[in-house]
Image (cartoon, rainbow, N blue to C red):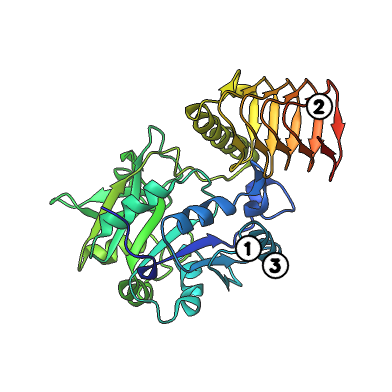
Amino acid sequence: MPPPPRQRLAAIVLAAGKGTRMRSDRAKVLHRLCGRPLVYYPVKRAIEAGADPVVVVVGHQAEAVRTALRQHLPEAPLRFAHQREQLGTAHAVLAARPALRGHRGAVLIVSGDTPLLTRETLEAVVRARGEGALAFATMTLENPEGYGRVVHAPHGGPALVGEEKDATPEERQIKEVNAGLYCADAGFLWTTLGKVDRRNAQREFYLTDLVALAAEGPGAAAAKVHSLEAMGVNDQEELSLAARALTRRVALSLMEQGVTIEDPERFDADEGVVVGTDTVLEPSVRLGGRTRIGRGCRIGQGSILTAVEVGDGTEVRPYSVLDRARVGRGCLVGPFGRLRPESALA
């Protein structure tokens, strides 16, 4: 089943937090992986799923987040909302309400620190809602520590999500957890958020309370997703793991198109690079920016190409650095070659 028409789907991306576990002066969502800020990826996936507009809730280093997204997604249907105090996820979603005034239909709610989400997963949660009030994504973890546990009613539907600090000992044994991805009817969302309170261990407005409130009335639907996709980035180690997983996806996509990557575990590339059939990429190659490489090329070990155009049949020998340059067909560069910005090799 195709996703709903674009005009019926909006999205909210939560990107207001500082991310203290990153141990950095930079806001968490501005940390880069595969050439782009962390928040770029859930925003881009929401757009690919048909969301228009996408409201990004900003807070810490708000202007820097706005600037980064406008730079990387200049044509995107973005709007911004400012959460001045971080009082919980439900409070963050309420901050987006003025930016969605007049919207009728579905609203996707996505965390800004989940770079591995795919368009297909977002569409699956939208489909799970159907014409209902609420759907949310769940995943099964062997070690669910730190996640809200999904409690099902006797009839089988989700009854509530118990945040770990509020969960009972029995609930903490549950391995199905909330993945932090929602799709709600706009009318239900704004009406029900007004009923969420802070009577919990963290004294925050929990977005997960929507599940229990939906269960009291129209009911909620749960859609299981792969745990890797819903992985949130909270510290530097998780950032590196996400970058490796994202790079692996890029490598697999290129190999499916007939590119030879001699060692995918020692390959780095930004999302969106283009490489022609029968090109060979030796170990430790790094492709960045809007790099375009033609067919039948060879890029030597340790070479770094950033926003470079390379013609068919060209060989870049090992340890060469090419930056915003153009290389024609059948050329030979390096080893240890250096092409500076605006260079052109015929």
Q: Residue at the spot x=52%, y=57% of the render?
A: 43
Instruction: Say which element carries label 3.
Output: helix
Of 222 and 199, the residue lying toward us: 222
Q: Mark 3 points at which residue?
A: 63
From the viewer's perspective, is 265 left or right of 249? right
From the viewer's perspective, is 196 left or right of 63? left
From the viewer's perspective, is 202 left or right of 154? right
Of 217 and 104, the residue lying toward us: 104
Q: Report the disc number at residue 320.
A: 2
Q: Name the residue under label 1.
A: 74
Of 202 and 258, the residue lying toward us: 258
Tag 2–tag 1 contact (CB < 8 Å): no
Question: In whole angstroms, how far apart are the C-alphas of marks 2 and 3?
Answer: 37 Å
Tell me where residue 203 appears, x and y as whole percent: 48, 64
Question: In whole angstroms, how far apart are the C-alphas of marks 3 and 1?
Answer: 15 Å
Mark 1: give few (<14), some (14-19) or many (20+) Cα within 10 Å: few
Dot 2 or dot 3: first in sequence order is 3
Tag 2–tag 3 contact (CB < 8 Å): no
Amino acid carrying label 3: it is Glu
Amino acid carrying label 2: it is Ser
Instruction: Say which element carries label 2.
Output: loop
Tell me where residue 330 appears, x and y as whole percent: 73, 26
Residue 19, can we see it? no
Mark 2: give few (<14), some (14-19) or many (20+) Cα within 10 Å: many
Amino acid carrying label 1: it is Pro
Instruction: Say which element carries label 1.
Output: loop
Q: Residue at the spot x=33%, y=38% of the render?
A: 175
